[in-house]
């Protein structure tokens, strides 16, 4: 699920954009890195989860 999306095109990148995606993953157990009870839209409530931020730099002519 996409919570927040931002895009920006630097002047030197012809048609390329920076895509930022913050997402949460509900996790069971206690040994996962960065695990804590926090709100995640994936579950719609406070759960033990990890938050991740993913960056992509798609450019025209690439797949």
Image (cartoon, rainbow, N blue to C red):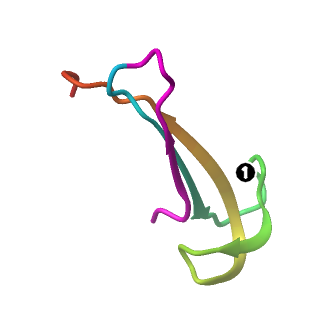
Q: Is residue 7 above or below residue 13?
A: below
Which is the main secondary structure of the residues drawn in magenta? loop
Residue 16 locus on image (x, y percent): 37, 27
Say if the magenta span includes residue 5: yes
Using the image, determine if residue 44 lies above or below residue 55: below
Mark 1: few, some, or many residues within 10 Å (few <14, many ≥20)? few
Q: Secondary structure at mark 1?
A: loop
**Disc 1: which residue:** 32
Whether residue 28 sits left or right of residue 19 in the image: it is: right
**Picture quadrant where residue 37 is located:** bottom right
Q: Nearest the camera: 27 or 50?
A: 50
Magenta segment, which residues? 1-13
Viewer-proximal residue among 47 and 30: 47
- Residue at 78% from the left image edge and 50% from the top image edge: 34
- Position in image of residue 61 (x %, y %): 18, 21
- Residue 44: percent from left, percent from top: 59, 83
- Whether 46 is drawn above or below 9: the answer is below
Quadrant location of the N terminus in the rendered image:
bottom left
């Amino acid at each position: 699920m996409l919570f927040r999306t931002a895009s920006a095109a630097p002047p030197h990148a012809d048609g390329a954009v920076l895509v930022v995606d913050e997402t949460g993953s509900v996790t069971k157990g206690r040994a996962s890195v960065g695990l804590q009870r926090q709100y995640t839209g994936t579950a719609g409530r406070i759960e033990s989860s990890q938050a991740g931020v993913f960056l992509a730099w798609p450019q025209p002519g690439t797949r």
